[in-house]
Image: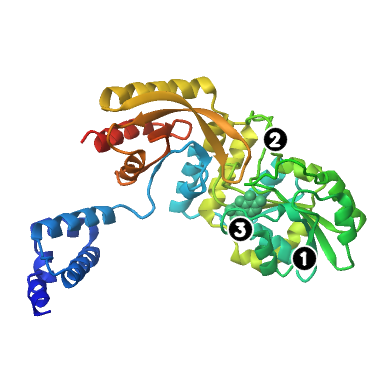
Amino acid sequence: MSDSRQRLSEIPGMDIILNYDWVQSWIDKLGRIRVKHVINSELSVIRRSIIEDKSAEFSHASFKSSCLSALAFASHSGLRHVINASGVVIHTNLGRSLIAPEAVKEMSAIAAHYSNLEYDLKAGSRGQRNSHIEEILCTLTGAESSLVVNNNAGAVMLALSALAKGREVIVSRGELVEIGGSFRIPDIMELSGAKLVEVGTTNRTHLHDYERAITENTSMLLKVHPSNFRIEGFTASPERKELARLAHEHGLIFMEDAGSGLMVDGDEINLPANTNEISIKSCLDCGADVVTFSGDKILGGPQIGGIVGRREFVDKLKRYPMARALRVDKVTIAGFEATLRLYAQGLYDEIPTLRMLRLDDETMRKRAEALAEKLSQTLTAEVHCIEVEDATGGGSCPEIMLKGWGVSVKHNVMSAGHIQKLLRFVDVPILCGAKDDEIVIHVRTLQEGEDEIVADALAGVMNV
Ligand SMILES: *Cc1c(COP(=O)(O)O)cnc(C)c1O
């Protein structure tokens, strides 16, 4: 024990460490308080190893090198630009949709200036933050009224609470599946105070199942978009129009949680065929009274939850106190409005999510060939241009694999898993696929200028 005390005493004190030249330069970059914090955690690792391992000693060289890499890591923002080379367009872990450059401009202008967020310029008096989006959202969807909140989970909770608290909501069992780790309709229902009534079996629900479940206390029939799962085979679910008719015959509300929120019907914007996604407008046309959707999935905007539908219901939500707790920030409103303007103008390729989904085979193949060419010149590895399977992701079109192009790289010593790990630690981290011990760079989700960054990073980690 006295031995470890002796070895611990060789660790210099913080005051001395902070005066080292190599530490001084980091103090300028990170601030003294953060440098101290980083060094302290490195020191506690060293102290622990000295106490636990009789042969461990303080080494200035290894202390310096571990501090330098910890300081370098700490110098990056927590939230960083990463390169999505996975081919999954709406990647929930990577921030879902990229925001259109036009919308980014609006967001940054509104962020940096005062705005008429809650001021009515025409009337010269207090205004409503929702008003800026209301007209364009109603025009695009054909809705009587609309509201935006923080996200779709919030939209569903608000709608259920305001319209069905203490009453029954009938949902098909086949639609009660977990959506993304944190969104479960039964949990949201419970929080909202609505009572869930499940009907049918997981793969078959008929109109008469809904009809039989209707009681005096029923408030709503709810349809949930099966965003990230698909029950194959022997399935049945009543058409929207029939559900709407049944609801209205009984004086009930018919609500749809559309999930991904397609602003224009899939065939109109040439989304990959048979996606089986219908637009918010079509949901309303089929008789839905209220439709909720996400802003940052296939819609391709910032994170919001949209609510559109009949005025009497949507207006009730606007007045409901929970709406205040779910309200949307001004920067988000600016970005969403700008995205909707692009839809109104038909400029679908200006919306990155739509552009990436609509990319044609030829464009992707050429890009993959060019990247493969470049990589084969710089890397000592096997490089091939290959066909790959991309995906929409993000709870849109679950069953649809998109045919795409990519570049496979196989190193003769390093495993694919090891290369993938190294690529997470470069300046702009890269997330790519892997298959048969080759890494696979999918070009569909690479943004402009990222091909070069990928090529440089690969050379950096593989040519050692
Ligand atoms: C994604 C999704 C949600 C949750 O939406 P967020 O915008 O992530 O809150 C809810 N319902 C369905 C059907 C979804 O696909």
Pick the quarter of the image with the N terminus. bottom left
Q: Earlier in the sequence, mark 2 or mark 1?
A: 1
Closest to the observer: 338 or 400?
400
Circle 2 crowding by C-alpha within 10 Å: few under 14, some 14–19, many from 20:
some
Q: Position of residue 434 (x, y in %)?
A: 42, 37
The answer to whether residue 55 is left or right of residue 213 is: left
Task: State the mark number for residue 265.
Answer: 2
Instruction: State how the image is colored.
Output: rainbow
Residue designated by label 3? 183
Q: Is mark 2 within 8 Å of ligand 1?
A: no
Pick the quarter of the image with the C terminus. top left
Residue designated by label 1? 164
* Amino acid type at mark 2: Asp
Residue at mark 2 to residue at mark 1: CA–CA distance: 30 Å
Closest to the observer: 362 or 401?
401
Q: Is mark 3 within 8 Å of ligand 1?
A: yes
| SS assignment at label 3 | loop
Determine the residue positioned at 33% across, 45% down.
Answer: 421
* Amino acid type at mark 1: Ala
Residue at mark 1 to residue at mark 3: CA–CA distance: 19 Å
| SS assignment at label 1 | helix
Residue 371 visible to the viewer: no
* Amino acid type at mark 3: Phe
Q: Quadrant of residue 436?
A: top left
